[in-house]
Image (cartoon, rainbow, N blue to C red):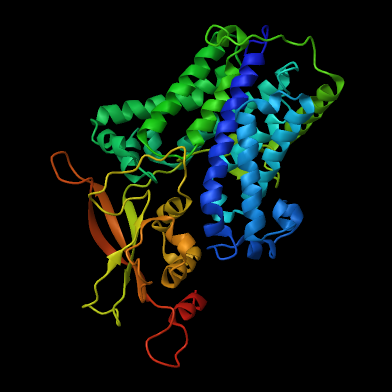
């Protein structure tokens, strides 16, 4: 990075980008957090907090874990996100700016720390870490702290280089350049372009893997180089992230990575693209300087384990080493699955789940189901249940206890859960039985009808009911869960 110029415009662009990502994250939470983690959710946060200590999962929800308090907290996050995105948070001075970004960080950290598997993705901790650094960037009437720009670039380096290193270690297909033969078909939520990319010639797939290695293993070292090398490094990384956005739905992972690239560009470059009249203060005030100095010391101390992890033979992917998620280790798609398995949930209102029963399928909003339905375009939005169903299809249901809670909610006709599906095949009353089957999905070939073809593999869950047929028998569904 070249620090002979100012970063006033850089800070402005970065804060607006991060405000947008916060807004998306809270909009996802307002639609999905309570159905998944509320009082009647699949993994209630209230129950989770009984099993952990505050120091291991600091969260506002230790104060109150009711659905009303959770919803109010999320809506507060939305309001603060709009406040930051509009730039109003920077118009009232340093104190208001720092408080705004601090509250955003506290609220989102509170969601992540009780979110369990539904908030266990790398971009969640990326937002927590980046959001914490944003607290110290200052307001529009203060000098942009250069050291905080360095710390943001350090997050970018760990994101990209960590992803590159885990690929070299975890799966041989990244070394023999064949991973993209499978990735477009087997990724969590393909989009329409994924079908066309999957049918690209083999040489194009291999070039794509080589470009991935170049961008994740070579380019990151130039983030710290003088201009114009850091400009080129940031530009190549943004180009790579745009390619990933076009090829699939990875929530806001690519968007926050693009935001992290912004500090690679200083005002000398951005001033050619953006015209915003402003005056740059001569120096930071004493309070701001002390806060930035303390931040630097904390980050340097906490960086030891993540830095060591990147070069470790037993590299962890997307791991936090302390509950505040201040400095983390990142990575994506260290392993690529070779075939796409899907769990298809079905229900019937027949009296008995025998061969004559008519089964109707539940359709998810994002993941493949109906073979003729076009793949979705959803990023930067994130369908959390769809992603977990992708993981669930990789192993037996015993490895995913929450799926039994999902079946129970469907049998009960829980409206909040049903809103997470594309359609409810039982609009009048809940089904009497639910089952789930394993299917192998493959893209259709050019010239064939539809987007997918599928083949039955085996039964995933046997037919389950809230109560076994016949009077006086214990609940069959509850008995099934107790045996696991």
| Res 146 quadrant in image | top right
Please give left or right for residue 267 compared with residue 210 in the image. Answer: right
**Residue 438 horizontal/vertical position (percent):** 32, 62
Please name the residue shown 21% across and 78% down the image: 356
Q: Nearer the viewer, residue 256 or 84?
A: 84
Q: Do we see residue 371 in this rendering?
A: yes
Residue 268, relative to residue 31: is it above or below? above
Please give left or right for residue 278 compared with residue 27 in the image. Answer: right
Q: Nearer the viewer, residue 81 or 257?
A: 81
| Res 161 quadrant in image | top right
**Residue 274 horizontal/vertical position (percent):** 55, 11
Please name the residue shown 81% across and 28% down the image: 291
**Residue 429 horizontal/vertical position (percent):** 37, 72
Count of picture labels: 0
Q: Nearer the viewer, residue 386 or 226?
A: 386
Q: Residue furthest bottom?
A: 472
Please name the residue shown 65% across and 51% down the image: 72
Q: Residue furthest left?
A: 447
Q: Do we see residue 120 in this rendering?
A: no
Residue 331, relative to residue 477: is it above or below? above
Please name the residue shown 74% across and 17% down the image: 141
């Amino acid at each position: 990075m070249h620090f002979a110029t100012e970063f006033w415009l850089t800070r402005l662009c970065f804060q607006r980008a991060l405000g947008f990502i916060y807004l998306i994250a809270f909009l996802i939470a307002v639609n999905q957090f309570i159905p998944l983690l509320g009082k009647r959710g699949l993994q209630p946060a209230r129950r989770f907090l009984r099993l952990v200590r505050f120091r291991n999962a600091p969260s506002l929800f230790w104060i109150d874990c009711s659905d009303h308090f959770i919803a109010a907290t999320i809506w507060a996050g939305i309001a603060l996100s709009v406040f930051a995105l509009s730039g109003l948070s920077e118009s009232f001075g340093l104190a208001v700016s720092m408080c705004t970004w601090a509250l955003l960080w506290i609220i989102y950290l509170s969601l992540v720390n009780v979110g369990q598997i539904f908030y266990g993705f790398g971009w969640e901790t990326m937002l927590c870490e980046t959001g914490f650094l944003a607290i110290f960037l200052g307001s529009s009437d203060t000098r942009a702290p250069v050291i905080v720009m360095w710390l943001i670039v350090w997050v970018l380096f760990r994101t990209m280089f960590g992803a590159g290193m885990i690929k070299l270690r975890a799966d041989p297909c990244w070394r023999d350049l064949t991973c993209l033969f499978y990735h477009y078909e087997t990724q969590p939520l393909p989009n329409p372009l994924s079908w066309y990319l999957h049918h690209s010639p083999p040489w194009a797939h291999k070039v794509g893997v080589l470009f991935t290695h170049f961008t994740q293993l070579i380019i990151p070292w130039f983030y710290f180089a003088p201009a114009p090398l850091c400009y080129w490094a940031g530009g190549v990384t943004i180009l790579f992230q745009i390619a990933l956005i076009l090829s699939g739905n990875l929530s806001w992972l690519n968007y926050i990575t693009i935001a992290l690239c912004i500090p690679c560009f200083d005002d000398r470059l951005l001033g050619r693209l953006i015209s915003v009249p402003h005056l740059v203060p001569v120096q930071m005030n004493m309070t701001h300087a002390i806060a930035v100095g303390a931040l630097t010391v904390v980050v340097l101390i906490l960086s030891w384990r993540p830095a060591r992890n990147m070069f470790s033979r037993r590299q962890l992917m997307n791991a936090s080493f302390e509950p505040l998620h201040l400095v983390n280790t990142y990575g994506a798609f260290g392993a690529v699955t070779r075939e796409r398995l899907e769990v298809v949930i079905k229900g019937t209102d027949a009296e008995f789940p025998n061969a004559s029963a008519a089964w109707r399928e539940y359709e998810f909003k994002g993941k493949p189901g109906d073979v003729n339905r076009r793949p979705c375009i959803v990023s930067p939005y994130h369908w959390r249940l769809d992603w977990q169903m992708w993981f669930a299809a990789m192993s037996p249901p015993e490895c995913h206890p929450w799926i039994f809670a999902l079946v129970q909610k469907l049998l009960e006709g829980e409206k909040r859960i049903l809103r997470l599906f594309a359609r409810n095949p039982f609009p009048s009353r809940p089904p009497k039985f639910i089952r789930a089957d394993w299917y192998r999905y493959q893209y259709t070939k050019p010239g064939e009808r539809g987007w997918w073809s599928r083949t039955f593999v085996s039964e995933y869950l046997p037919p389950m009911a809230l109560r076994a047929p016949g009077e006086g028998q214990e609940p069959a569904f509850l008995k099934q869960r107790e045996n696991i």
